[in-house]
Amino acid sequence: MTAPRTLFDRIWQSHVVVDRGDGYHLLYVDRHLMHDGSGPGFAQLRERGLRVRRPELALATPDHYTSTAARTLDAIPDPQHRGHVEQMRENTREAGIERFFFIDDARQGIAHVVSPEQGLTQPGITLVCGDSHTATHGALGALAFGIGASEVTHVMATQCLWQRKPRAMRISVDGALGEGVGAKDVVLAIIARIGAAGGVGHVIEYAGSTIRGLSIEGRLTVCNMSIEAGARAGMVAPDDTTYAYLHGRPLAPSGADWERALARWRALPTDADAAFDREVSLDATRIEPMLTWGTSPEDAIAITDRVPEPSTAPDATKREAMRLSLEYMGLVPGTPMTEVAVDRVFIGSCTNSRIEDLRSAAAVVRGRKAVVPAWVVPGSGLVKRQAEAEGLHQVFREAGLEWREPGCSMCVGMNGDTGLPGQRIASTSNRNFMGRQGRGVRTHLLSPAMAAAAAVTGRFTDVRRLAAQGA
Ligand code: SF4
């Protein structure tokens, strides 16, 4: 009889090519996502006279540098950035990568939105990308993690990667979510609980009735922010929700292959008596709509809370960090979060730019008017098309929000979509670090519904209050 195993163990063990005996394993990589920051990897291959070993296992799409004003190269203002996007055509052509979605392709978008949407992300696979938020793909039961520039080159050349095996952590969330509370609130509550370093050295499996009850879009949001808790990866065991999501997607198995894949996928979930190195549990019924007050994703509190007092911090180091954070954020301890005014709103990023996110934001702004500038940036051309088919773009436009083209946009502002120094931005993205959305910009992370509520009130607002009022 074999020992009980976790989902993570199963995927890891089935991908080991070489066990070096010192904790490091050479892993086989099933899928490699490339974006407009992958250029150095191609350049290094060329220098060394190497080729991409398995181009059929790659998917490439520009996202960080693309313009959200128009889907053209000319719309990218910085010539160097334009060059990165343009160079992708040459790099992928030379490498024989056929799954390349350029800016004139409706399938282009943020790599972490595009790959699940196409059905390329599947249960049981290993997937890497030269981007921190690759953990997103764990939502479909994959082992997915971000890699550095030299690792990108290694994967391109060999389709393998040396990795030290992380430990396993399970975070169980149980209970029904309240009105106005969604996946973003769940993951912010998790990070507030375990801290920005709480997952260091671990792969997190998210489990429990609340996680099982989330759609794939919701699970993608939760797994996306695993890295913000310091984890190497985050995953959710595949189930009927996963299979229903994947069935019929362009790159998912079909016909007899689908049945064979289903049989494999159903054998993946963690055994009932498998052990984890660390277990954490949360009661979902106690989670309220959340938002961050500081410059780390762990600085998350409920909308009903007040800006915290540094004097309540457990030690001097933490007190000083809080003081600096509050100074940067321009917040006074003790202020109710609902009294904090916002200057701008950004609804987008690989955390929250999928159709379900846009629906929840549209439901809040429908029949209301934005009182501060607000952008809605769909995660891909296909999300945009779907939203337009449902008339969501009209809802946003009638409410005065800007309906943009797909891309990373203000999540990181590499394409020039940044705020101004001192501006306070309600953002559905995943990082609130100092300067993340532009020099001196103050970022508050929250859900699409909460961001929409901020757009129509001009301050942080409990979305449950707006829902009670009706439009
Ligand atoms: S949306 Fe933000 S976090 Fe996601 S890939 Fe783009 S820059 Fe990275």
Image: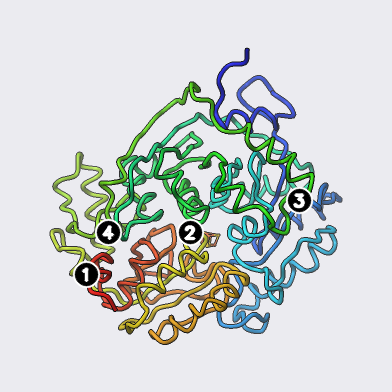
Q: Residues within 10 Å of mark 2 (few under 14, many from 20)?
A: many
Q: Position of residue 348 (x, y in %)?
A: 48, 68
State whether label 4 is within 8 Å of ligand 1.
Answer: no
State the separation of the CA atoms marked 1 and 2. 24 Å
Q: Quadrant of residue 47?
A: bottom right
State whether label 2 is within 8 Å of ligand 1.
Answer: yes
Q: Which mark is residue 351?
A: 2
Residue type, numbered disc 1? Val
State the separation of the CA atoms marked 4 and 1. 10 Å
Q: Quadrant of residue 424?
A: bottom left
Nearest to the observer: residue 2 or residue 23: 2
Which numbered disc, 3 or 2, marks the residue closer to the eye? 3
Residue type, numbered disc 3? Ser
Drawn side of residue 470 relative to residue 138, left or right = left
Q: Residues within 10 Å of mark 1 (few under 14, many from 20)?
A: some
- The residue drawn where x is 33% and y is 74% is 423
Q: Position of residue 64 (x, y in %)?
A: 58, 66
N-term-proximal mark, 1 vs 2: 1
Q: What residue did someone put label 3 on?
A: 254
N-term-proximal mark, 4 vs 2: 4
Q: Quadrant of residue 259?
A: top right
Give yes or no for contact between labels 1 and 2 (Cβ–Cβ under 8 Å).
no
Q: Which mark is residue 340?
A: 1
Drawn side of residue 130 relative to residue 373, left or right = right
Query: Please, which residue is most extreme toward the top here?
Result: 1
Residue type, numbered disc 2? Thr
